[in-house]
C-alpha cells in the first residue's frame, strides 16, 4: 500500500525526460524557442519584479491543456491515500461570499491585509467551501485548496513536474510577442469574455458577467495559440520556482529554474477573484507567490513533461 503522504523533495527535481512511450494524453506539445519574458507595461507591478523584459530560451516540453481537475486529483487520492496539507492542518482559506452562515459564525479572526479570506475548518479539495460543501457536479473544475507540496506529490505520482516560471509564461503567451493577455492586448474581444475574473466591486459584489462566481470548468473559454485553456484567470497555478522580485536581473536566460532558495513559490495566471482595482495579475507577465504549505480556494496547478530534444 502506498504511504499516506508521498516523500516530497523541497527542491526542483531533475528534469524528467519523456520516454518514447510516455502517455501525453491531455497534454499539448510546446515547441522550444526564445521569447521576451516579463513586461515594462505601466499596468505591471514593479514590486513583483515583472521587469525588465529580457530574452529567455526554453526547450520543448509538454503541458497539460488545462489545470488538474477534481476528477484527476481524486484518482490520485484514491490510488495513494495521500492527505493534503489543508486536511492535515484542518482548515484552508475560503472567500467570504462562499461561506455558509453556519461556518462563518465559527470564524474568530481573518487576515488583516485580506479580510475577505476566511480560515474555514474542514475546507479542503473535496470540500471547497467548508465541511458542508462537496465537489459533486464540479468534477471538471480545477482542483483547489492544494499547496505547492500537494502539487509536487501529485506530480511525483503521475511522473511529471511543475512548470518553471519561464515555461509557464512562454506557454501562456501562446506564440504572441509581448501581448498583455494570452489572446492579445484587449481584455475583451468583440464584447466577449476571454477569462474568468471578477466583474463588479471587489470584494462585495461580483456581477459574474463572464458566467462564473467561483471556479469555471478547466476547459472554459477559448484556448490560446498553443491550445491551452485558462492561462488567465480561473485559478492561480503553482510553478516550481522560488520567488524573487529581483530574479529577472540575474541574467539567467537558458531554461532558468529560478532562485536556489526563497520563502515563497511562484504562482501564475491570476484567478476568479482578480480585478483591475485590486489584483490586476491575470496578465500573462504578472507574478505572485505563496508559501509552499499554503492553500486557498483559488489556487491549483497544471503539470509539464520535458520533450525529447532533437
Image (cartoon, rainbow, N blue to C red):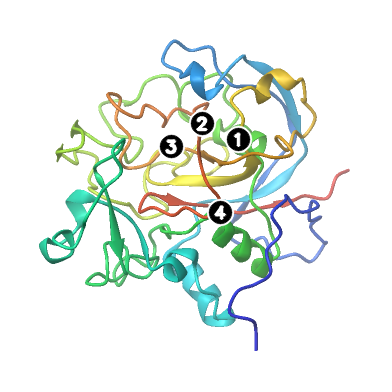
Measured as percent of width and height from the top left, residue 236 is found at 45, 44
Mark positioned earlier in the residue sequence (2 or 4): 4
Write down the residue under mark 4. 148
Q: Nearer the viewer, residue 159 or 211?
A: 159
Image-quadrant location for residue 104: bottom left
Image-quadrant location for residue 10: bottom right
Mark positioned earlier in the residue sequence (4 or 3): 4
Write down the residue under mark 3. 232
Element type at marker 1?
loop
* Mark in the foreground, 1 or 2: 1
Measured as percent of width and height from the top left, residue 255 is found at 77, 34
Q: Residue at x 67, y 25 (%)?
A: 247
Image-quadrant location for residue 266: top right
Write down the residue under mark 2. 287
Circles 1 and 2 in contact, beta carbons < 8 Å: yes
Tell me if mark 3 has few (under 14), some (14-19) or many (20+) residues whose alpha carbon lies within 10 angstroms of its own. Answer: many
Amino acid at each position: 500500500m502506498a504511504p499516506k503522504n508521498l516523500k516530497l523533495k523541497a527542491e526542483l527535481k531533475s528534469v524528467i525526460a519523456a520516454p518514447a512511450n510516455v502517455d501525453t494524453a491531455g497534454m499539448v506539445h510546446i515547441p522550444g524557442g526564445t521569447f521576451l519574458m516579463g513586461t515594462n507595461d505601466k499596468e505591471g507591478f514593479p514590486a513583483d519584479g515583472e521587469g525588465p523584459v529580457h530574452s529567455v530560451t526554453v526547450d520543448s516540453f509538454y503541458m497539460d491543456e488545462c489545470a488538474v481537475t477534481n476528477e484527476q486529483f481524486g484518482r490520485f487520492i484514491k490510488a495513494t491515500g495521500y492527505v493534503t496539507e489543508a486536511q492535515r492542518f484542518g482548515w484552508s482559506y475560503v472567500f467570504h461570499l462562499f461561506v455558509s452562515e453556519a461556518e462563518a459564525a465559527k470564524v474568530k479572526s481573518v487576515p488583516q491585509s485580506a479580510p475577505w479570506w476566511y480560515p474555514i475548518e474542514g475546507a479542503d479539495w473535496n470540500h471547497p467551501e467548508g465541511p458542508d460543501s462537496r465537489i459533486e457536479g464540479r468534477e471538471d473544475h480545477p482542483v483547489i485548496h492544494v499547496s505547492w507540496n500537494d502539487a509536487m506529490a501529485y506530480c511525483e505520482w503521475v511522473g511529471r513536474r511543475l512548470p518553471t516560471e519561464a515555461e509557464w509564461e512562454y506557454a501562456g503567451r501562446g506564440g504572441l510577442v509581448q501581448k498583455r493577455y494570452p489572446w492579445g492586448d484587449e481584455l475583451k474581444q468583440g464584447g466577449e469574455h476571454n477569462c474568468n475574473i471578477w466583474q463588479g466591486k471587489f470584494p462585495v459584489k461580483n456581477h459574474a458577467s463572464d458566467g462564473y462566481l467561483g471556479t469555471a470548468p478547466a476547459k472554459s473559454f477559448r484556448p490560446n495559440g498553443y491550445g491551452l485553456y485558462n492561462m488567465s484567470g480561473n485559478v492561480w497555478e503553482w510553478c516550481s520556482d522560488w520567488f524573487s522580485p529581483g530574479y529577472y536581473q540575474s541574467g539567467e536566460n537558458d531554461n532558468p529554474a529560478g532562485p536556489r532558495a526563497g520563502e515563497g513559490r511562484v504562482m501564475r495566471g491570476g484567478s476568479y477573484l482578480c480585478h483591475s482595482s485590486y489584483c490586476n495579475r491575470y496578465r500573462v507577465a504578472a507574478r505572485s507567490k505563496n508559501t509552499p504549505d499554503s492553500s486557498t480556494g483559488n489556487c491549483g496547478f497544471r503539470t509539464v513533461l520535458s520533450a525529447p530534444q532533437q
